[in-house]
Image: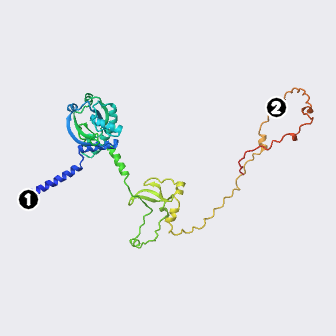
Amino acid sequence: MSNSNSNAVLRRKATVGREAYQARAMSPAKALRLALSKAADELFDLPLVVTGVQQARIGLDPLLGELSDETLLILLDGPDSSLGVLTVDIQLLAGLIEMQTTARVIPMVADARPPTRTDAAMVAPLVDAFMARLEDNLADEPDGYWVKGFRFGVRVEDVRMLGLALEAPDYNIFRLSVDLFGGAKLGEIALALPERPAPRYGSEDQPDAAMMGVALTNTLMNVPTDISAVLRRITMPLSAVGQLKVGDVLTLPREALSSTSLEATPKKKLVEVSLGQLNGFRAVRLNRAVGAAPLAKSRAADDDLNSDAESDAFSGLPDLPDLGGLPDLPDLPDLSSLPDLPDIGGGDLAGALPDLPDLPDLPDLPSLPDLPDLPDLDAGTESGDIITVDDLPDIGAMPMIDLPPLES
């Protein structure tokens, strides 16, 4: 009797656990419902409810036998040149067209008509959004690989043309019963995707070692780390350390500022730096890495890392002793014993030049012709007076541009 009661309790606990898991798990039927409803709501603000989902595994010939030329036939492009099929019946197609053109679904049965290319173009955004959401919903599920990568491809005229395009022997087919706008129209969508083997480690889907190395490098380079600037390590007896109090000054050598080391871990020296200040902040300038030759110091860098840090760090150091005056320099040696330079005067130089030859006589020039007499100046004026400079009109001072001042 006790065994029966304990078994009943275990069965109830197992049932509750299984129901809780199923509520959290994303089954294909649940993923299809959510994907189609949310895609229609986001694209067209259309209330769409999936009232039923049927799933089956079927071969290519039976699949073609269940499809009809009266539905909109869409060929889906998938990964690795795989092809799928999505069909939309005329009632659902009419409701989607009405919602996009009139912002409402007419509550009446649509007349039968052949689907057109315009119908396919207006349904294409919903197909892509539906397949993308279906892929996201099943991304964490072990069987979610079979829906990855499928998008709207092309409209197919009839089932015969569809059979010529499909090549996979087996398909997973899902039939979704759809309610538009609270029963205004009832339709059906069929989705058939080829059966594919599950991906395995070592296949082409697995990232290669180079890609994994790049991802690992990017991750490690973004890991935060602490770097400390160590001025100098001082060795002190334990008794002196125990007597330290607030306000005590530790004496550091002056070269500590120019030989500060950056350390990531205790006593793990990364690089040697100089401590200073830049734009009001404490800063360090790289001198050299461990084992590298020292870098040449630039005057601009020395000006940036100013002496404020030195005055703060060595404010408690004693004054340096007076070095006294420098010794006198020795007298220059007597240069009077040097010989005189040779004379290069003009007398000797002129005597060394050769005599120039005499120039030939110039030929006699012909006589100039007689000039005519000048006219009488009285004939040039009406009054007979000669025009003088004082009689000329005043033309005023000419403007001059400003000249630059000359440097003395």
* Relative height, residue 324 to residue 275 (above, below): below
- Which quadrant would residue 75 be assigned to in this image? top left
Does residue 253 appear in this view? yes
Tell which of 137 and 140 is nearer to you. Answer: 137
The answer to which of 91 and 119 lies nearer the viewer is 91
User: Earlier along the polypeptide chain: callout 1 or callout 2?
Assistant: 1
Q: Residues within 10 Å of mark 2 (few under 14, many from 20)?
A: few
Tell me the element at label 2: loop
Q: Position of residue 144 (x, y in %)?
A: 25, 43
- Judge the density around disc 1: few (<14), some (14-19), many (≥20) Cα neighbours within 10 Å: few
Residue at (87, 40) in percent of width and height: 391
Which of the 4 quarters of the picture holds residue 134? top left
Q: Position of residue 82 (x, y in %)?
A: 28, 35
User: Residue 167 vs residue 255: left or right?
Assistant: left
User: Mark 1 = which residue?
Assistant: 2
Foreground: 54 or 99? 99
Dot 1 falls on a residue whose secondary structure is: helix
Residue at the location (44% across, 59% down)? Answer: 261
The amino acid type of the residue labelled 1 equals Ser
Please name the residue that numbered disc 2 is placed on: 359
